[in-house]
Amino acid sequence: MRAVTSLPCAIKEEEHVRIPVSDGTRLSARIWRPTASDDEPVPAVLEYIPYRKRDLSSVRDSIHHPYMAGHGYACVRVDIRGTGESEGVLTDEYLEVEQTDAEDVLAWLADQPWCDGRTGMMGISWGAFSALQVAARRPPSLRAIVIASFTDDRYADDMHYMGGCLLSDNLAEAGTMFAYATCPPDPALVGDRWRDMWRERLENSRPWAAEWLRHQRRDDYWRHASVCEDYSAVRVPVLASSGWADGYSNAVTRLLENLDVPRRGLIGPWSHKYPHLGEPGPAIGYLQEVVRWWDHWLKDKDNEAMDGPMLRAWMQESVPPSTSYEERPGRWVGEPAWPSPHIERLSRPLSPHRIGAPGETAADGTEMTVQSPLSVGQFAGKWASYNAPPDLPYDQREEDGGSMVFDTDPLPERLEILGAPTVELDLSVSEPVAMVAARLSDVAPDGRATRVSYGLLNLTRRDGRAAPEPLVPGEHYRAVVQLNGTAQAFPPGHRIRLSLSTSYWPLAWPPPRPVLLTVYSGASALTLPVRPAAEPDEVTARPFDEPEGTPPLEVTQVSPPEQRWTVSRDLVGYNASLEIVKDNGTVRYEDIGLEASRRAYERYDSVADDFQSVRGESAWTMTFRRDDWEVRTVTRTVLRSTETEFLLHATLDGYEGGERVFSRTWNETVPRDHL
């Protein structure tokens, strides 16, 4: 990424601005704005997240907020209530109070003498959720949003549940937020109040996983702040982006299809990263795109922001399987609308071991069966890749050994798909609670299989995820499994493979008991969204610029990071485990003289094919140190299950100067709800 040191506007920075909200709580903001805005007001752009602007997100913030400020905007980074130096307690995501706070912040910004009354919101992940959700509330000053890696559907397409199946990322993300919400503010900014503020957070925190487990079906808890419940509520222009390696790519095309406002979509090869920091590459000049967007919608400039196709997507070329890529070969393609008039959905019938050609028919009623071992899924990677440690799916051949596998004949010519494949199944199962995991792979002539997309479906929710019903063993059912959207080119001579399994641990929590799945040919089919290779790419807009941003804050790596992703199997006791370590080491933030350490540890265990043996753990250690001040929080959440219940155990410990000053333990039992 190119570091830009010369900007159109000189800027000033205010490190700790306290913004009052309606109940008297004060939120902490960091503001970068043009020096001239004292006399010539400018629009304000808000990023609103819980990830600690003072330290843990400061390097990333320093790359893009001064950059946009230098292009004529007041850029405002606010820590959500209960995080960083903001007062209060954070107990869950996307609560009503969080959104009313955001509306209060926007109103405050619009009323400042350096703001011209127009505002925008931007962010990735939580920040993008916030921007989209607040946009649906229509605050009067908000004129446009820019969002990356987000969802419009908190239940069906987030890290909690997928196709009605419980994701292990539900536990992992709960552990992350349990850790972040219990960290102290910095005494250098809040003074002697820091200890009381920290104590309030410790005493009022709880393991986030417990609440998420209590809502296993689509209920009002998930409907709240799910914009898909009423797309018409969003009345501002939207620039939406994500990456094919992320878990959130599906929401981009849903917004393009369902919103009735000016909108543009961008999907690259990236993991859960901003596009200008995108991994795998190529990264793009995203901040230039963002500035053009703001210029058009916040300053009424007649520029190229709305030129070109509605969707620009990276068409990925075939690659060997790997848990990490520096670059994904491919090209940008464009579509004028979504759904695109260029995409043709072609259905291919399923028969034993074979995916037929479009237009073929398969003999009715041929039975195909599988009962997958718990080991299927150990090479699945993360639901949302962060590309560190390497967390993409590995070679699928081992996974396919425990799956029902269908292959096409070797392709006679290149085939490209763009969109979401679906699998329609005529099936029966042996248990009242069952799931299907469907994986689409690119199989090279040497047999290596690279996963292209996948989808999950809890069959008790096959007719809608709000009211699950148990299955009758042996009875025939129709079910459609939607896979994640993708853009993928299959070369001639390669085969397309569909693999079906009845478990996908540890990416998804398995059903209560092993399941024998029977699939019947005749009415079972794979449907692919085919983009004809001869179709023009329609990238009529200018090519993307080189990634750039302002120079990042200076940091020193005091102790080295550690990244580990280890699959192990004990063939004596038949124990299998996936162990993940993401340790950032100790980093010194030179501008504030603070050292911070973050270590995340996840472990997922099972024994043989004992579905009652599965266990997940998420543990975090967060340490902050300056001179003789040192504070550490240690959080741990463990999830197990029986056939009828989830068993949650969590601990929280706070240390000051090496002495434990707070400790609490939770043990909670949550009934399984057709899961």
Image (tube, grey):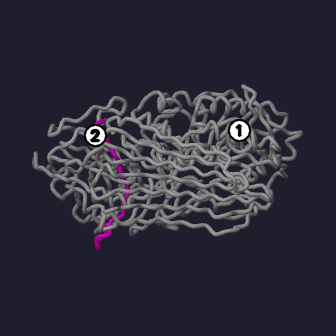
Apparent side of residue 305 relative to residue 588 in the rendered image (left or right): left
Q: Residue at point 62% right, 58% down?
A: 598
- Number of the front mark, 2 or 1: 2
User: In the image as oriented, which residue stretches furthest toward the bottom?
Assistant: 446
State left or right for residue 435 relative to residue 309. left
Which comes sooner in the sequence, label 2 or label 1? 1
- Label 1: element kind: helix
Q: Residues within 10 Å of mark 1 (few under 14, many from 20)?
A: many
Image quarter for residue 449? Answer: bottom left
Disc number at residue 4? none
- SS at mark 2 in the image: helix
Quadrant containing the C terminus is top left
Which residue bears the numbered disc 2? 459
Q: Type of residue at label 1? A: Leu
Whether residue 256 can be seen here: no
Residue 554 location (% of width, % of height): 76, 63
Instruction: Please indicate whether residue 245 sits to the left or right of residue 559 in the image.
Output: left
**Residue 610, x across and y down, in percent:** 28, 53
Residue 588 part of the magenta segment: no
Q: Residues within 10 Å of mark 2 (few under 14, many from 20)?
A: many
Q: Is residue 591 above or below residue 237?
A: below
Residue 536, visible in the rendered structure: yes
Q: Which residues are magenta?
A: 443-460
Residue to which mark 1 is pinned: 298
In the image, residue 568 above or below residue 419: below
